[in-house]
Image (cartoon, rainbow, N blue to C red):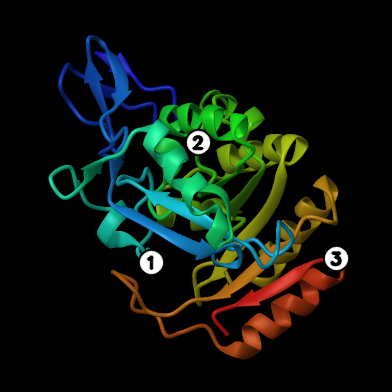
Amino acid sequence: MARCPMCFRHCERAEGELGFCRARKVKGGVFVPENYGKCTSLALDPIEKKPLKLFCPGSKILSYGSYGCNLRCPFCQNYEISQQNLWEESREVTPEELVRLAKDLVPEGNIGIAFTYNEPMVDPEMIRDTFLRAKKEGLKTVVVTNGCASLTALSLVLGLTDAMNIDLKGFTEDCFRYLGGDLAETKAFIAEAVRKCHVELTTLLVPGRNDDEDAFRKEVDWIASLNPEIPLHLTRYFPRYRETAEATPKETLLRFEAIARGELRHVFLGNV
């Protein structure tokens, strides 16, 4: 049996078996990224779509997605990509090809490469190999992640990453149990990332799931203890995938925005 070191699940699997994320597989007695270079999505996006508000505003970035995720969020907005094994629907893209395409798009406003859409940290090896080449070409590098990855996984990419948007999906153990995640690992991931690169956080407010004001005040206190300059995106939820709760009332976003602004200098609302 092999044990995966890349996230809190520490999947133990036999030869040839996939981990929970559907992206890592045991080969030769070790877990390797089965989705390495398997591209399902590729687009030139505004940087604000990641979302990043204070990192190269007004620019565009080549956004790459594969498949696989180590969470099962019922409200996943990219479930067609992250929650399915899309091996047959994907196409091969090497790190060299990705960097070459990113350079070709510079005249169109591209600043670099973002790993996004699915959960990119299930394959930090592809991020590392691409970013090593991207930095040599003067390109910016971005990761959009749920933050439920080990410091082992983070260490493969952190020194090569210019910016991250990290989902802080809630601030209670109950919320993370509902998502199948791990709050302690996410907090450790964020705390380490803010030391090494530009970080913006996103909290999708879902009624009845993570809209408790006391818990949110603790979240804001914790973010401020790291750095009150960290931008926080508060995003309005709409029914999606398997989550059927009504959309987040706008009044909730405005109330939580006021709470956050009491300690944080940069608070943004999304999907309003």
Badge 2 density bin: few <14, some 14–19, many ≥20, Cα 10 Å: many
Residue drawn at the location 55% of the way across and 27% of the way down: 132
Instruction: Judge by depth and name the residue closer to the eye, 63 or 21.
Output: 63
| Residue on which the image places disc 1 | 77
Q: Are marks 1 and 3 in contact (CB under 8 Å)?
A: no
Left or right relative to 137: residue 125: left
- Residue 120: quarter of image: top left
The mark nearer the N terminus, 2 or 3, is 2
Q: Which mark is residue 149?
A: 2
Badge 3 density bin: few <14, some 14–19, many ≥20, Cα 10 Å: some
Viewport quadrant of the C terminus: bottom right
Instruction: Judge by depth and name the residue closer to the eye, 207 or 32.
Output: 32
The mark nearer the N terminus, 1 or 2, is 1
Q: CA distance from mark 1 to mark 3?
A: 28 Å
Three-letter amino acid code of the residue under disc 1 = Gln
Q: Position of residue 69 (x, y in %)?
A: 35, 46
| Residue on which the image places disc 3 | 265
What number of labels is visible?
A: 3
Q: CA distance from mark 1 to mark 2?
A: 20 Å
Left or right relative to 115: residue 203: right
Q: Position of residue 81 (x, y in %)?
A: 29, 55
Three-letter amino acid code of the residue under disc 2 = Ala
Q: Are marks 2 and 3 in contact (CB under 8 Å)?
A: no
Q: CA distance from mark 2 to mark 3?
A: 27 Å
Residue drawn at the location 64% of the way across and 61% of the way down: 52
Q: Position of residue 155 (x, y in %)?
A: 59, 25
* For residue 150, above or below residue 252: above
Residue drawn at the location 53% of the way across and 62% of the way down: 108
Q: Residue furthest top?
A: 28
Q: Position of residue 188 (x, y in %)?
A: 65, 36
